[in-house]
Image: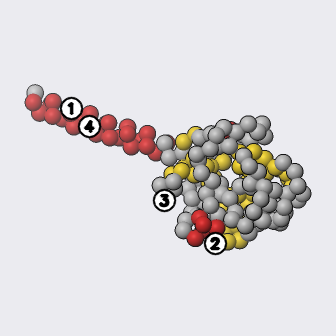
Amino acid sequence: MRMMNTMHRRMSALLFIALVTACGRDSARKTVSASLGTASAPNVGRYLTDAKGRAVYMFVIDGKDSSACVGACAAAWPPLSADSGASADPTVRSELIGRISRSDDRQQTTYNRMPVYYYEDDEQPGDIKGQGKNEFGGLWYLVAPSGDAIRSGAGGTAATR
């Protein structure tokens, strides 16, 4: 009987550990309310911005829910923090907004499960100078409200929000 109780406790502990581990996998991508909007530019159409109108980009080297941009890359392409308010723009699909934990322990906003970034040379709202850049081993693209990369157009300044 004593051996059965010991086995039962061990099995319960293993089951608990398995459940915690399984739950932890899904929590890597948490829903977050990031303050995203959109703007429009010739040759690229409508693209995502932050609440202040700054363009946000995706990096083709990144994987779903995973950032490959660290160190000097993250200095040139700062990650969009996940500590923002709710989006009021009806063209932004709130169900596509999420967040990940980066290797530097900061939270980063994702859109359609892809990490999003600013570009350091975009000096003001409407600048899209990072569009189509080939830096840090891959291409950088504006993000469409659909969550897809916008692969057309060259960097410059957008006219409308």
**Marking on residue 8:** 1
Element under disc 1: helix
In the rendered image, residue 160, in percent from the top left (x then y), is placed at 87, 51
Q: Rounded to the nearest whole Å, what is the CA distance between mark 2 and mark 4?
A: 45 Å
Amino acid type at image mark 2 = Gly
Q: Earlier in the sequence, mark 4 or mark 3?
A: 4
Q: Earlier in the sequence, mark 2 or mark 3?
A: 3
Distance from label 1 to label 4 (Cα)?
A: 9 Å
Would residue 75 be seen by someone viewing this image from the given angle? yes
Q: Which residue is mark 2?
A: 137
Is the Cβ of the residue at disc 2 closer than 8 Å to that at disc 3? no
User: Label 1 sits on what residue type?
Assistant: His
Q: Residue furthest left?
A: 2
* Disc 3: which residue: 104
Q: Amino acid at mark 4?
A: Ala
Q: Secondary structure at mark 2?
A: loop
Mark nearer the N terminus (1 vs 4): 1
x and y, in percent, of residue 36 in the image: 71, 45
Q: Nearer the viewer, mark 2 or mark 3?
A: 3
The residue carrying mark 4 is 13
Q: Give whichever of discs 1 and 3 has the lower sequence position.
A: 1
Image point 75% across, 45% down: which residue?
A: 37
| Tag 3: amino acid | Asp
- Cα gap from disc 1 to disc 3, whole angstroms: 40 Å
